[in-house]
Amino acid sequence: GALLFEASTVMAEVNPIYAVSRLIFDQLFEQIIRSISTPGSLMPLHMSDWRRSEMVEAVTNMTMRHLSLGYLSKDHHLFQLLAAVRIHTCQVYPGIVDDLQAALSRCGAALDYPAAAPRKPHAWLPEAGWLNLICLASSVPHFRNLLDELSRGDSKWKAWWEKEAPELEDPPLTELELDPFHRLLLIRALREDRLAPAAESFVTWVLSGAATAARGGRSGTVTPERSTPSVGVNNPRPPW
């Protein structure tokens, strides 16, 4: 719940009319939990881990759907991405959440080339892309050997970079395996024009429960026993 509320506060920075009070959010979240919980208990202690995981997934998706009612359609994907990034990074990388979120949002924009960066290894590599890769290598542990990989594979990296949809292809990494989040970071760094489809794949991976399954948990869907409550948000516009 706290992670979804954080995402909603960022949306309020995008547009002030998206603001949702913590009280309204807590009411929405609690009523959604009650709508799918066993009568008499919000989250029974005796519940099995896989059932608890299913309920968390269902509550997350239902809460996001309700919050999205207050956003313009063009901003739905942004909210989903903000929520998915927070959920995934806090679960998998709790110690470096801020670094990962900064790598996705700002990447290498704060670096200065060539003063604060080594010389780029290939002529085809854009300066902005090179700075982004330096940022990934220094802030994301999974990419600590990325610059060496890039330096050794000129033609293969160039071929991947020139593909029409590189987010659908495996980059020429010999020592790294990428999950959808790492792939999203790499696309953000080198092919920002393909960020939207990469983000969509990542959001689907997280919110469908596939990310939980990849970490050894179980995923699935929960059918509400009663209709989901409709709780209004602090927004004067009708939903569309």
Image: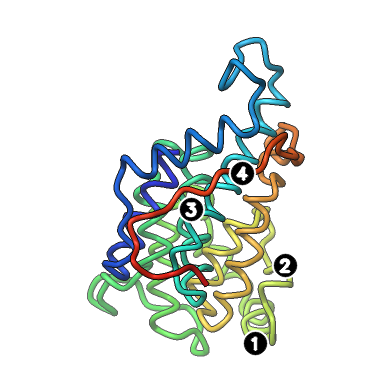
Residue at (56% x, 71% y) in the render: 187
State the separation of the CA atoms marked 1 and 2: 13 Å
Do the numbered discs 1 and 4 sit on residues whose CB atoms are within 8 Å? no
Image position, residue 215 (x, y; %): 68, 36
Q: Secondary structure at mark 2?
A: loop
Q: Name the amino acid type tagged 3.
A: Ala
Asked if 52 appears above or below 11 in the picture, the reply is: above
The disc placed on residue 83 is 3
227 or 88, which is in the foreground? Answer: 227
Residue corresponding to mark 2: 170
Residue corresponding to mark 4: 228
Do the numbered discs 3 and 4 sit on residues whose CB atoms are within 8 Å? no
Closer to the eye: label 1 or 3: 3
The disc placed on residue 162 is 1
| Number of other residues with Cα within 10 Å of mark 4, as a class: few under 14, some 14 to 19, many 20 or more | some
232 or 53, which is in the foreground? Answer: 232
Q: Name the amino acid type tagged 1.
A: Glu
Give the mark, 2 or 3, whose residue is nearer the N terminus: 3
Give the mark, 3 or 4, whose residue is nearer the N terminus: 3
Q: Name the amino acid type tagged 4.
A: Thr
Residue at (57% x, 30% y) in the render: 34
Closer to the eye: label 2 or 3: 3
Give the mark, 1 or 3, whose residue is nearer the N terminus: 3
State the separation of the CA atoms marked 1 and 3: 30 Å
State the separation of the CA atoms marked 3 and 4: 20 Å
